[in-house]
Amino acid sequence: MSVGLLALLDDVAGLVKVAAASLDDVAGQAAKASAKAAGALIDDAAVTPNYVTGFTADRELPIIGKIAWGSIRNKLLFLLPAALLLSVFAPWLITPLLMIGGGYLCYEGAEKIFHALRPHDAEVHEAGLEPVAISAETLEDRKVAGAIQTDFILSAEIMTIVLSAIHVDNFWFRAAALALAGVGITVAVYGAVALIVKADDFGLWTARSARTEFGRAFGRGIVVSMPVFLQILGVVGTAAMTWVGGSIIVHGLYEFGIDWPEHIVEAAAHWAEASVPAIAGVTGWLATAAVDFVFGIMLGAILIPVVGLVLAPAFRALKHLLPKRA
């Protein structure tokens, strides 16, 4: 009896070890896949603080909480099942969908640069796009609804990127890794957004309440530096979004047999590594990102008139053909 009990305990211990190793593998896959979506994540963190502009300090965190909860619902209830169905029944669609998302990132990045360089022309372009109709009663509701809709687009791109980077054969492990990555990404992004949004309040409190002159000066430094930090974050987010979009397009074209953009990226990386061998890894990555950024800007610049002159009118025409709700 005791021998049987010991054998049972040994089997249980073995199962626990296998489960722990599986969980570790899932966590590792989720972490690696999340890193692939860094560009979209930075842009998400850069865009979200704008949604609390104009609200009192006591409403900032509740608004971010509502947007974060909406983001989790987007990822787990809609995008996760869709991504898993794709991976099982239509894996060949993942690359085209990635490229569509990459094109969207390139368009957004180019449009932001266009707005910075030619604000009047950019506003004319934006005015020609179909506005999103949201039936909400308050400004806060409209802001939250708009943020969740924007998050859905970014989350779809993020989840597709994460899915393409998860290399787990077991369906349930793949689902667990994708869900873990989705929740982890949401917590990381909106946690960072909450810290950014409340940093100026913390700095103001420190400047008034710190017991030492150094502490008060530190608080004033936070208050003064936050607008500059947000501007830098916006620039980094735009650059990251554009080079990630360009990278997705380049790799997608390579898979469809159009390999010359990939060869240009590789040649630039090899040249940069050979030029500064002491930091070859850094220079190679910078060269790769720079060329991907150029491809992204070129594609985004092409898509701006396509969206304004073709896609937006087509969407309006399609919308008018659909029956209107009472």
Image: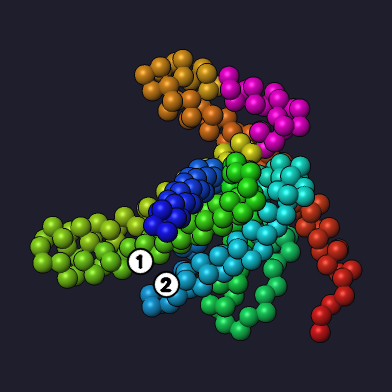
Based on the displayed image, in which of its 4 quarters is residue 324 positioned? Answer: bottom right
Q: Is residue 262 magenta?
A: yes
Q: Identify the residue shown where x is 73% and y is 49%.
A: 88
Which residue appears farthest toward the right when viewing the image? 321
Compared to residue 306, the image places residue 139 above or below, namely below
| Residue 61 point in image, percent of width and height | 42, 72
Query: Alpha-carbon neighbours of circle 2 within 10 Å: few (<14), some, or many (≥20)?
Result: some
Q: Is residue 46 visible?
A: no
Closer-to-camera residue (35/101): 35
Residue range in magenta is 249-267
- Which label sits on residue 198? 1
* Mark nearer the N terminus (1 vs 2): 2
The amino acid pointed to by label 2 is: Leu
C-alpha span from label 1 to label 2: 8 Å
Q: Which residue is mark 2?
A: 61
Q: Identify the residue shown where x is 11% and y is 61%.
A: 213
